[in-house]
Image (cartoon, grey):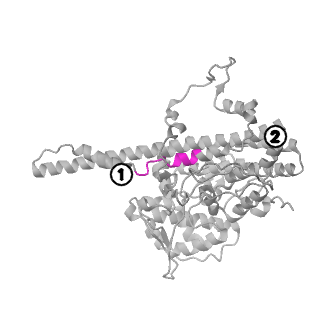
């Protein structure tokens, strides 16, 4: 018997808002009992700036979660304690000052709330984005960035708010695709190729809309602000040895038997929407560096069971109902198998390939964002570190020369050499970019091949969105309708094709490590 298709309402998913709450998140808990949490969350910026965050947290009373009533209240509490937790851990600048213990006034209620919501006790994508926004005009659309504001941030800056809100707008704009794919799956079950094609065409166009939204990241979030101010607070406690957490964090509970816990940092890989796209289209991802196996027969027409990789690991950081929805969808996904069984329909095959190309294009845009916000900025950070190390060595050598009356020779070169050796460890992006590029390339693997034989409407859409006017002369170079801004082309995705896949990389939410032997490729990065 063929299992039923999922009813999205059973998984806390709405037709209008998708994985976002059906109603806007609470901006404050109604019970004044929780005022200590609210007051501290409202003053994170000043407490972090004054280095008084830990003192303020240590003075919090141990509050019970028994007075949280609605799901919205549980979510609000989760967001507050998540931001308070990461502020407590990462609130000081030096690695030696990172806190490896979370006091029980935060850890006990945070663990209870996390268990209720079925999410880990850390700042997840849900804490930063799904449950951390509010429309400025309640009657206005929540897929319009200008109508959104955040509820809690670490820095109080527009850069940080914008970073979260771009993802919120993507979730809202992508919400209609969920029911669209469900309708396509229903149509595939009854053999209605026309409806499947129409749904897929609309799906591809919507993904291109999401690509445009992602491209707006640069409008109000600068790479420098993100990399140096925001990103450190998004780190988890897993693979963070270099940052001062060699074992993770102890969540105090008063038992005296606490153990270290390790969690990945916030990541857009924790977005259920993006994983939904992959499952719907039958896109499979593998651990980084693993090649595609020879095609195997899929007798039941369902999406094959995915292998262990970073993207699969990130499902455990999604809200429980959303995670179960993806698991259910995996057992009934049939669009890829339906297209493969009806390749004689050029319209159907083309519509499917357009979806894959649109999703691949979305990931291309994300690669550009990562290049600009991480790779380039990490290189700048490394240069500054080398310069500082060289300057320090110069000063030391001069002092030694004065004391010994010797003339310092070659001290600058030695300092640079030692600094360079240290700086080469975990150079920004060398592991991250191959990881993201493989995910992008895997997106096109199920393509039928019809794409290259037809004139795609999507190509025209992409050309128009780039401001390119197609030339009337075959073989001639397209003309841009606006001047090329070379300033934003300082880093090309393909520049990293041959970058060594170092074990250590730097992601959007901190350092992460890839264990190629065990396949434990998890960590805090931003990944689509």
> Residue 94 or 301: which is nearer the viewer?
301
Quadrant housing residue 99:
bottom left
Secondary structure of the residue carrying tag 1 is helix
Quadrant housing residue 522:
bottom right
Q: Residue at x 77, y 59 (%)?
A: 331
Crowd rating for badge 2 (residues with CA inside 10 Å; few <14, some 14–19, many 20+): some
Q: What stretch of residues is rendered in magenta?
A: 425-437
> Residue 184 or 171: which is nearer the viewer?
184
In the drawing, does residue 300 fall left or right of residue 459?
right
Question: Could you tell me residue 30's position as x and y percent?
Answer: 65, 68
Q: Which mark is residue 422?
A: 1
Q: Does residue 322 belong to the magenta stretch?
A: no
Secondary structure of the residue carrying tag 2 is loop
Looking at the image, residue 434 lies above or below residue 99 = above
Give the label, 1 or 2, closer to the camera. 2
Which residue position holds label 2? Answer: 343
> Residue 19 or 199: which is nearer the viewer?
199
Question: Could you tell me residue 167's position as x and y percent?
Answer: 63, 50
Q: Can residue 197 be seen in the rendering of this structure?
A: yes
Question: Could you tell me residue 266's position as x and y percent?
Answer: 56, 57
């Amino acid at each position: 018997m063929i299992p039923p298709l999922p009813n999205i309402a059973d998984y806390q998913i709405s037709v209008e808002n998708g994985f976002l709450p059906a109603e806007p998140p609470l901006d404050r808990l109604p019970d004044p009992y929780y005022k200590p949490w609210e007051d501290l969350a409202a003053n994170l910026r000043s407490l972090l700036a004054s280095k008084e965050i830990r003192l303020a947290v240590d003075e919090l009373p141990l509050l019970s979660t028994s007075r949280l009533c609605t799901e919205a209240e549980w979510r609000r509490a989760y967001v507050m304690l998540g931001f308070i937790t990461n502020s407590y851990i990462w609130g000081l600048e030096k690695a030696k000052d990172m806190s490896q213990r979370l006091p029980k006034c935060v850890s006990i209620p945070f663990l209870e709330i996390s268990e209720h919501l079925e999410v880990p006790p850390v700042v997840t994508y849900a804490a930063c984005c799904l449950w951390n926004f509010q429309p400025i005009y309640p009657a206005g659309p929540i897929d319009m960035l200008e109508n959104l504001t955040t509820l809690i941030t670490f820095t109080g800056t527009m850069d940080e708010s914008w970073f979260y809100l771009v993802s919120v707008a993507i979730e809202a704009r992508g919400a209609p695709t969920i029911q669209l794919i469900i309708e396509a799956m229903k149509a595939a079950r009854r053999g209605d190729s026309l409806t499947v094609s129409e749904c897929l065409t609309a799906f591809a166009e919507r993904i291109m809309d999401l690509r445009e939204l992602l491209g707006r990241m640069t409008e109000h979030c600068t790479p420098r602000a993100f990399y140096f101010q925001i990103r450190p607070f998004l780190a988890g406690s897993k693979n963070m040895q270099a940052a001062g957490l060699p074992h993770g964090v102890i969540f105090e509970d008063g038992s005296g038997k606490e153990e270290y816990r390790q969690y990945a940092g916030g990541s857009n890989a924790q977005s259920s929407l993006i994983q939904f796209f992959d499952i719907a289209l039958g896109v499979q991802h593998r651990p980084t560096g693993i090649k595609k196996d020879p095609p195997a027969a899929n007798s039941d027409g369902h999406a094959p069971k995915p292998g262990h990789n970073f993207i699969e690991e990130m499902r455990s950081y999604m809200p429980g109902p959303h995670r179960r929805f993806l698991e259910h969808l995996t057992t009934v996904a049939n669009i890829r198998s339906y297209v493969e069984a009806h390749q004689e329909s050029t319209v159907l095959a083309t519509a499917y390939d357009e979806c894959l190309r649109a999703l691949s294009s979305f990931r291309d845009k994300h690669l550009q964002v990562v290049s600009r916000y991480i790779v380039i900025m990490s290189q700048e950070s490394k240069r500054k570190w080398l310069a500082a190390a060289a300057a320090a060595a110069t000063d030391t050598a001069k002092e030694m020369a004065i004391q010994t009356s010797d003339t310092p020779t070659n001290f600058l070169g030695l300092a640079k050499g030692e600094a360079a050796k240290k700086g080469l460890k975990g150079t920004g992006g060398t592991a991250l970019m191959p990881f993201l590029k493989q995910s992008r390339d895997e997106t096109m693997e199920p393509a039928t091949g019809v794409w290259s034989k037809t004139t795609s409407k999507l190509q025209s859409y992409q050309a128009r969105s780039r401001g390119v006017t197609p030339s009337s002369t075959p073989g001639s170079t397209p003309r841009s309708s606006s001047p090329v801004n070379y300033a934003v082309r300082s880093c090309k995705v393909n520049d990293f094709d041959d970058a060594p896949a170092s074990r250590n990389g730097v992601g959007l939410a901190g350092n992460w490590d890839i264990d190629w032997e065990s396949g434990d490729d998890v960590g805090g990065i931003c990944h689509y």
